[in-house]
Image (tube, coloured by chain):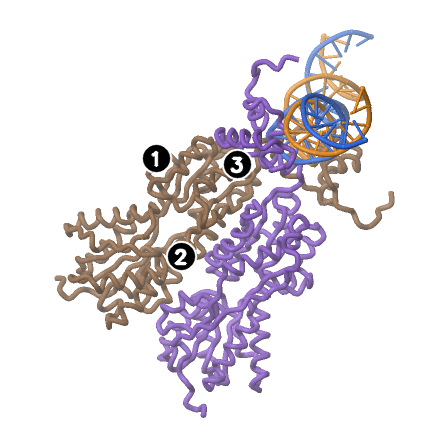
Chain colours: A purple, B brown, C blue, D orange
Amino acid sequence: MVDGGKPRPMKGIRQLAEHLDISIGTISRALNGKPDVNEETRKRVLAAAEQLGYVANQSGRSLRQGTTNVIGLMIQSSKETVENSDNFFLTVTGGLQSVFSRHNLDLIMLPCPHDEDPYEYLKRMVARRIVDALILSETQRVDKRFDLLAKAKIPFAALGRSLSGVQHPWADLDFDSVANSAVDRLVARGHRRIAISVPTSDINLGFVFAEGYRHALERHGIPYDPALIIRAKSSEQGGYQVADELLRLEDRPTAVILIYELMAIGLYRRVMEAGIIPGRDIAVVGFREAPRAKFLQPALTCFRTSLHDLGVELAEILLSSMPAYNHLYPDTNRQRTWSLELVPGESDAFYLPSSK
Amino acid sequence: MVDGGKPRPMKGIRQLAEHLDISIGTISRALNGKPDVNEETRKRVLAAAEQLGYVANQSGRSLRQGTTNVIGLMIQSSKETVENSDNFFLTVTGGLQSVFSRHNLDLIMLPCPHDEDPYEYLKRMVARRIVDALILSETQRVDKRFDLLAKAKIPFAALGRSLSGVQHPWADLDFDSVANSAVDRLVARGHRRIAISVPTSDINLGFVFAEGYRHALERHGIPYDPALIIRAKSSEQGGYQVADELLRLEDRPTAVILIYELMAIGLYRRVMEAGIIPGRDIAVVGFREAPRAKFLQPALTCFRTSLHDLGVELAEILLSSMPAYNHLYPDTNRQRTWSLELVPGESDAFYLPSSK
DNA sequence: CATAGTATCGTAAACGTTTACGGAGCGTGT
DNA sequence: ACACGCTCCGTAAACGTTTACGATACTATG
């Protein structure tokens, strides 16, 4: 057997092997940190790989190992839900990656097209085996996607709770306590008719938010009025519509809780058109994103949190439910609500004269 | 034939072949629409695949074909971008997908972690051969990534121009003409000291914007004052800082052009703190996102465009530079600026008394 | 009947990895 | 001398596809 010249240019690991005159098996072991390889040769291999710019072909590796080292984050970006969702996802993504990168896992975002059914899209992605695990977001109240993933035996976690697949791992903002403390704060200022905005879609956070609101009212002995639950898009336009609704109500609320802070822009606009000054004639409390709310006029009272850290938490929850990694995250609480901190502004600073 | 009731999930093409008693070659040909297969058997194969939920394993296919049918969109989500990107990426993504889906191409987003060098990140993604082609965004004035992609012979296009790789395909908003018409409009209202905000980073759009502004001034014979070019983050906070700078200038400008509309929130806040009313004492023009600007108080004059259609355009540009698809997009202009439409608001509606 | 052509299908070889298995070399203890 | 264990490395078989090639049956043509 003459292993003489090079009849044709080899690619990949074979070329590297030929260049070093080492077998491909050893090369692979050296690169993957396997124990049974001389440290001396490992150094040579690593150096040569670096120099020649060799990186293992992912398809070959995936095919052999049955694993892709890629985690998918599915986002729906549907027109109806949250229009300003990018920085939300990108910030959470940062937290996710800071954990995944420690395990050489890459995160990719899977944006489901508007015109495709999310369930079918997910089914396709799962079947193609392009990712090892999945993170779902914008969870619906009942969400068939959980059943699909459970049946396909693909590890997953969710950014947001859901009623389906009760035991699924998730991390979620604590909508419940936010609604509670918002109501507490407003009641302390003399408000009794408090409106709340919820999303138009069936996204579960809307229900959780509304339930928290309802419980808080109960606690204060304030009657619950369904007319004060206003469905609107989570955008400036939605805020404008919320104000429209408020103005139409006969016994007009003195306060309103918005589920998304940018809605305040539209709401401010609309009530001021009606001669009503936010922070003087009507109290407004928003949700999330304190740094932005600070610059509204009047500054919006709202709730701050670190979406980055929420991402970190969610990543750990996911890894703890992946067989290959769960030993690293032994007793992780797999269902975790993430708290927010109240940031007082001027939008609800006044006290109702009728109170006390 | 007893149909047990629950068809268990298939592992691969071999089991499908066994189930149908057809060779795997024929199965593959049938599924991929190859000509030399009987229509009758093709129907049988498709039906069985559908029933058993068989979808080709992507790794196997990629390995054999050397192609993944996946297009990557790299986003950097640097701290600054995170704050202002809003639904920018998701909207463009929608346009991209509407084209790609016609060719059975899936789009994934590749978010480069904050703490990783974009160049190294891209290099890794390229080497792993996880995508067939790439779309770059947030292009820098000089951007080494283009050289990397050119050398790796990976098809690519950019969302945004760059000075490097002069001949690279791109689609970009027409910052030049936006700056021009903003200046024209302000000059027509009597303004001669017009400030402009640009991003703090080296992202190329800032330079293009500033150049357009400069040319417009030249056209009107207005002297160019570097002090009127204000670097600030593209966020509410950035807008606040812009206002700060403006107030500090001795010969205070009467108008300001913002590169990102949300900056107006912070700017409004700051100038009003100084007793200056936007739309009366100072003219403000913003860039992009007319629907949102409408709800600011006073409504912001800005420029509207369809980011979705920009995505469509960009997708076609990319496909036209991919060998496998370029025959479908024969004479596509591979460098395309995308125009915007002025949406008049109230923020610059007044005329300077000194004019005329 | 021989031959060529056509439609359809099966066979097997890739694609680039990882890894189970075994073998060579060497040291050590009996 | 022998057995044994250890360290290190090469060999070859997978992983699930696609596809070049050839085989078969059938039809048409001479």
Q: Name the chain under label 2.
A: B
Residue B327, visible in the rendered structure: no
Q: Which residue is mark 1?
A: B166
| First in sequence: mark 2 vs mark 1 | 2
| As drawn, A144 above or below B337 | below
Q: Which residue is mark 3?
A: B132
Amino acid under disc 1: Val
Secondary structure at badge 1 equals loop
Secondary structure at badge 2 equals helix
Amino acid under disc 2: Asn
**Residue A195 shows which numbered tag?**
none
Mark-to-mark CA distance, 2 and 3: 29 Å
Confirm whether circles 3 and 1 share one chain.
Answer: yes
Residue at 19% over, 64% down:
B351
| As drawn, A15 above or below A299 | above
Residue at 76% over, 35% down:
B17
Which residue is at the front of the view, B270 or B133?
B270
Q: Name the chain under label 3.
A: B
| First in sequence: mark 2 vs mark 3 | 2
Confirm whether circles 2 and 1 share one chain.
Answer: yes
| Quarter assignment of residue A280 | bottom left
Q: Which residue is mark 2?
A: B84
Q: Name the chain under label 1.
A: B
Residue A202: % across, % down: 59, 65
Residue A18, visible in the rendered structure: yes
Q: Residues within 10 Å of mark 3 (few under 14, many from 20)?
A: some
Residue B285: % across, % down: 29, 59
| As drawn, A254 above or below B140 | below
Amino acid under disc 3: Asp
